[in-house]
Image: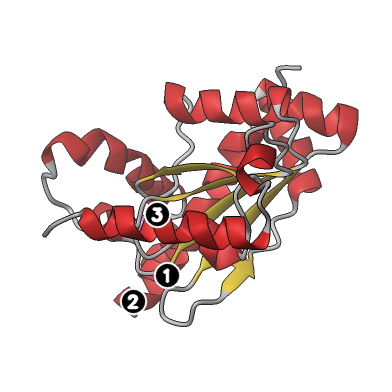
């Protein structure tokens, strides 16, 4: 497959933007002040900006397999730190999705080579909620539930960071857990009790 169409798309996109506002790119070049950090899955069907209807400059994005916030992952930790401390985002969102290949792979015992340590983090989420998940008979429902529980757990990992604890205390930063359903296109807020969770978590993980 040739990639030439991408450059043609890009030229058309530039033309469209400049048609609406000749200063569009010079304004973009002045800097970014996104209010939102979005941590989502790399899945090609879950297009962060497009599904939220946001434009360039409006959201700082980090994506990896199964939207994981792993404590030792320097990449996601740097993104959180930069977004919260430097860009001063007001919201951090962990957005999971149904039909997630990463979540599915973690539910099936198999050797996935280099992916093993990554999937192990999702398997840990399964283990934490094993009673609830094993009680769900229908495998598809269990799979859906794990995707949601994984979002919750990754939100907790976000809350464990010093920058997030500090920004919440100083300027009311909020953490949200959302789930996107590929089958319907709908985005749903999992209504995670951020303040309650923060209070509990601070008893163990307070770093600020
Ligand atoms: Co996924």
CA distance for labels 3 and 2 = 39 Å
Query: Quick check: can you spot residue 47?
Result: no
Query: Quick check: can you spot residue 77?
Result: yes
Which residue is drawn at the image coordinates 64% and 64% (left, top)? 190
Q: Quadrant of the N terminus?
A: bottom left
The spot of residue 24 in percent (x, y) is 65, 48
Which residue is drawn at the image coordinates 49% and 77% (left, top)? 185
Query: For mark 2, what is the residue?
Result: 140
Q: Judge the density around disc 3: few (<14), some (14-19), many (≥20) Cα neighbours within 10 Å.
A: few
Q: Quadrant of the C terminus?
A: top right
- Rendering quadrant holding ligand 1: bottom left
Q: Nearer the viewer, mark 3 or mark 2?
A: 3
The spot of residue 127 in percent (x, y) is 39, 48
Identity of the residue furthest to the top in this view: 208
Residue 205 figure quarter: top right
Label 3: element kind: helix
The spot of residue 4 in percent (x, y) is 21, 55
Label 1: element kind: helix
Task: Confirm or deny contact between disc 1 and disc 2 (CB under 8 A).
Answer: yes
Query: For mark 3, what is the residue?
Result: 10
Which residue is drawn at the image coordinates 33% and 47% (left, top)? 123
Q: Is residue 146 left or right of residue 31?
A: left
**Which callout, 3 or 1, points at the residue further toward the start of the chain?**
3
The spot of residue 168 in percent (x, y) is 81, 33
CA distance for labels 1 and 2 = 6 Å
Which residue is drawn at the image coordinates 59% and 30% (left, top)? 80
Task: Confirm or deny contact between disc 3 and disc 1 (CB under 8 A).
Answer: no
Q: Which mark is residue 31?
A: none
Q: Which mark is residue 144?
A: 1
């Amino acid at each position: 497959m040739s990639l030439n169409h991408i450059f043609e798309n890009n030229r058309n996109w530039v033309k469209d933007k400049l048609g609406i506002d000749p200063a569009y790119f010079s304004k973009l070049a002045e800097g970014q002040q996104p209010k939102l950090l979005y941590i989502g899955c790399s899945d090609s069907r879950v297009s962060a900006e497009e599904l939220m209807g946001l434009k360039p400059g409006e959201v700082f994005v980090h994506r990896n397999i199964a939207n994981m916030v792993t404590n030792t992952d320097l990449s996601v930790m740097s993104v959180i730190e930069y977004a919260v401390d430097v860009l001063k985002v007001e919201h951090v969102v962990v957005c999971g999705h149904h039909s997630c290949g990463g979540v599915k792979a973690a539910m099936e015992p198999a050797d996935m080579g280099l992916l093993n340590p990554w999937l192990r983090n999702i398997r840990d989420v399964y283990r934490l909620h094993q009673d609830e998940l094993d009680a769900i008979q229908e495998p598809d429902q269990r799979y859906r539930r794990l995707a949601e529980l994984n979002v919750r757990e990754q939100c907790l990992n976000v809350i464990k960071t010093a920058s997030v604890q500090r920004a919440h205390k100083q300027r009311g930063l909020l953490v949200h857990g959302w789930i996107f359903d590929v089958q319907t296109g709908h985005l749903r807020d999992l209504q995670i009790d951020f303040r309650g969770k923060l209070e509990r978590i601070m008893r163990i993980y307070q770093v600020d």
